[in-house]
Amino acid sequence: MIALTLGLYGLIARYLITRADAIACRLYPEEDTQTAIVGLDKDALLAIALIAIGVLCMIRGLTELPGGIFSVTWYAKYRSPEDLRRSWGGLLSVVLEIGVGFYLVLGKHGIIRAIEYLRSR
């Protein structure tokens, strides 16, 4: 499920990157197009799209996290080991989705700086 979600987000990001000029032309009238695009190159649009996708991943993952934790604890107490393994898989996918969201928002260097900051405290 997470692979499908991330694949969908990746396709949306790719579409936004490759079709940014066409989307801007549709959103703004012909005479305002040049003023709307000034200062936004493809790298800036990529950064904006990846941050937006990262925020979506984090929001979705954080909303599913309490349910995943509850299902693991409930299945551990009342259900079979097979159900417990499935609920652990669901919880793992939620945690991975949150991690991918943080990576897309912060980037590699941002995560390294955050870890170094936490270690120095």
Image (cartoon, rainbow, N blue to C red):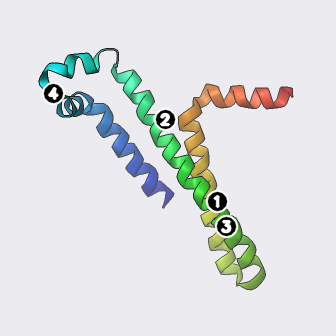
What crowding class fits label 3: few (fewer than 14 Cα within 10 Å), some (14-19), or many (20 or more)?
some
Residue at 45 percent across and 35 percent down: it is 50
What crowding class fits label 2: few (fewer than 14 Cα within 10 Å), some (14-19), or many (20 or more)?
some
Q: Which quarter of the rendered picture does the C terminus lie within?
A: top right
Q: Which mark is residue 88?
A: 3
In-image side of 96 versus 7 (left or right)? right
Residue 54 x, y percent position in the rendering: 51, 41
Front: mark 3 or 2:
2
Q: Which mark is residue 49?
A: none
Mark 3: secondary structure:
helix
Residue 33, placed above or below residue 94? above
Mark 2–mark 1 Cα distance, whole angstroms, equals 21 Å
Residue 29 x, y percent position in the rendering: 15, 27
What crowding class fits label 4: few (fewer than 14 Cα within 10 Å), some (14-19), or many (20 or more)?
few
Res 41 → quadrant: top left
Which residue position is annotated with label 4? 29
Residue at 71 percent across and 80 percent down: it is 81
Mark 1–mark 4 Cα distance, whole angstroms, equals 43 Å
Mark positioned earlier in the residue sequence (1 or 4): 4
Mark positioned earlier in the residue sequence (3 or 1): 1
Mark 2: secondary structure:
helix
Q: Which mark is residue 51?
A: 2
Q: What is the three-letter code of the residue carrying label 1?
A: Leu
Q: What is the three-letter code of the residue carrying label 4?
A: Pro
Mark 3–mark 2 Cα distance, whole angstroms, equals 28 Å
